[in-house]
Amino acid sequence: MTSHDEHARHDHAGHQHSMQEGHGDHAGHAGHAGHGGGVNAMAASATLHCLTGCAIGEIAGLMIGTAIGLSTGWTIVLAVSLAFAFGYALSTLPLLKSGLAVGAAFSVVLAADTLSIATMELVDNLVMALIPGAMEAGLVNVVFWIAMMIALSVAFVAAFPVNRYLLQRGKGHALTHQYHGAEPVREGFRRYLPSFSSGALAAVIVAFMLGGLSVAIADEIGDGPAPAGQVEMQGH
């Protein structure tokens, strides 16, 4: 009788173990099936963060360079430098909010974002250089803003596979991903650090571009030819 009970318990335990193994295999298979989508979403988010920083930095650099009368070459240098600065800053904020020290956060971001931002800047400036008149157009010019939209779109497409490649190998934004899900630290200066979702960043870029384009269009309309009656009065 005892032997029969032990045998039954053994069969039942074996059956449970088999079910657990099967469940584990199923879970692993499900995770693997969703892995591609997860990597693509993470790569898109990482690229969008870089794109936002690059766009803000480049426009700020061009505005400053134009305002203080820098040459085209130095204006480009300033714009690219600010693009890196803003790109790093946007990626550093979530790490600081998670409690990471400033130096440690910057070190992680430096390793995670440099290749992505460099790719984006290289492609962006190359496209701007290839579009006739884009580099010399100035900020209040429709050609500049349309060229910038095209250049940033191409730069996003170019940087996305770079970020995806790095993520698949545990590099790039994979280095920062563990901090993004952490509970934010609400102490000291970290209480005032903003959080930006991918949707908010996309909205900022679109609004920024459309705003600049609208100002350029309004300026061109305002500088249009004077009405015929006004020309005759001026001639008289």
Image (cartoon, helix red, strand yellow):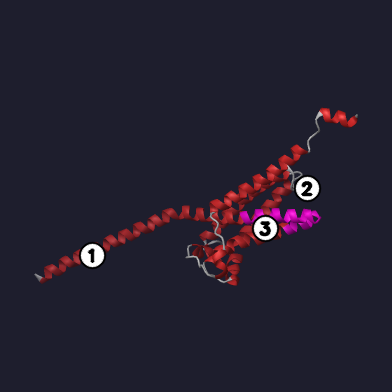
| Helix, strand or loop for the magenta stretch, by majority | helix
Instruction: Select label 1 or label 2 by which is in front.
Output: 2
Does residue 2 appear to the left or right of 65 in the view shown? Answer: left
Whether residue 216 is in magenta: the answer is: no
Tell me which amino acid carries mark 2.
Glu
Quadrant in the picture for residue 165:
bottom right
Tell me which amino acid carries mark 1.
Gly
The range drawn in magenta is 52-78
Quadrant in the picture for residue 6:
bottom left
Q: Which residue is mark 2?
A: 136
Determine the residue positioned at 61% across, 58% down.
Answer: 116
Q: Which residue is mark 3?
A: 83
Tell me which amino acid carries mark 3.
Ala
- Secondary structure state at the residue bearing disc 2: loop
Residue 191 location (% of width, % of height) = 54, 66
The C terminus, quarter of image: top right
Q: Which residue is mark 1?
A: 14
Quadrant in the picture for residue 120:
bottom right
Whether residue 67 is in magenta: the answer is: yes
Residue 173 location (% of width, % of height) = 55, 61
Q: Residues within 10 Å of mark 3 (few under 14, many from 20)?
A: many
Does residue 78 appear to the left or right of 4 in the view shown? Answer: right
Q: CA distance from mark 1 to mark 2?
A: 76 Å
